Image: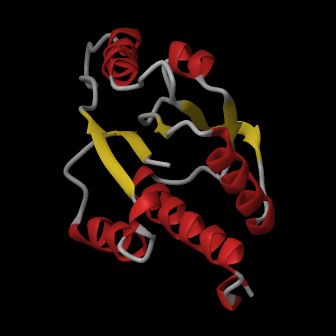
Amino acid sequence: MKIKLLAVGGKMPAWVTTGFNEYNKRMPGEMSVELIEIPLGHRGKGADLARAIKREGDAMLALIPATDWVVALEVTGKTWSTEQLAGQMEKWQMNGSNLCLLIGGPDGLDPRCSARSDQKWSLSALTLPHPMVRILLSEQLYRAWTVIQGHPYHK
C-alpha cells in the first residue's frame, strides 16, 4: 500500500522536515509516506478566502486517483487510539487501495475534498499548527505500524 500525504502549505521550517523524515524513514518501504505539498492559496488583505480554498481543493483533488482510499484529517473526524489506528492501517492494507491522507490549510479543507473522503480522522480536539500535524501524523503512523509488527514501541 502506498501512502500519500497531501498537505496544504509549504516552506516548512527545517525542524518540521527533520521530524517528519525521522519517522517516515523508519517505516517499511511499502508503507512509507510520500509528502506532496499543495501551494497555499493567497490570503491577506482583500483576498477572496473562498477562492483560495477552492484553488487548494482543485490542486488536491487533481492528485487523488479514483481508486485511492481517502482519509481527511478534520477536527470533526473520528479520534482513534494508537491500537485503533493500527486496526485501521490493517483494514487499509486489506482494502488493496493506496491511501491518501488530506491536510487542509489554515481555514480547513475545501468541502469537495471532505466530500471525496472515505473517512474523516481527527488527531485531536485541539487546534494544532499545520507543521506539528505533519510530525504527529508521521509519528502515529510509525507507532501504529510497530503495534501491527508486535513491537513494544507503543507503550
Residue 146 drawn above or below residue 93: below
Residue 143 drawn above or below residue 65: below
The front one of 72 and 31 is: 31
Q: In the image, residue 127 lies at what x, y percent? A: 60, 49
Residue 33 lies left or right of residue 151; in this view the side is left
- Give the residue at x 65% y 68%: 144
Q: How is the image coloured?
A: secondary structure
Q: In the image, residue 7 lies at what x, y percent? A: 38, 41
Residue 80 lies left or right of residue 39; in this view the side is right
Residue 27 lies left or right of residue 117; in this view the side is left
Which of the 4 quarters of the picture holds residue 80?
Answer: bottom right
Residue 155 visible, this angle: yes
Q: In the image, residue 63 lies at what x, y percent? A: 34, 25
- Give the residue at x 47% y 59%: 31
Q: In the image, residue 135 lies at what x, y percent? A: 45, 65
The front one of 80 and 94 is: 94
- Give the residue at x 69% y 33%: 119
Residue 137 drawn above or below residue 27: above
Residue 144 drawn above or below residue 66: below
Which of the 4 quarters of the picture holds residue 60?
Answer: top left
The front one of 153 and 80 is: 153
Say which quadrant the C terminus sits in. Answer: bottom right
Residue 124 visible, this angle: no
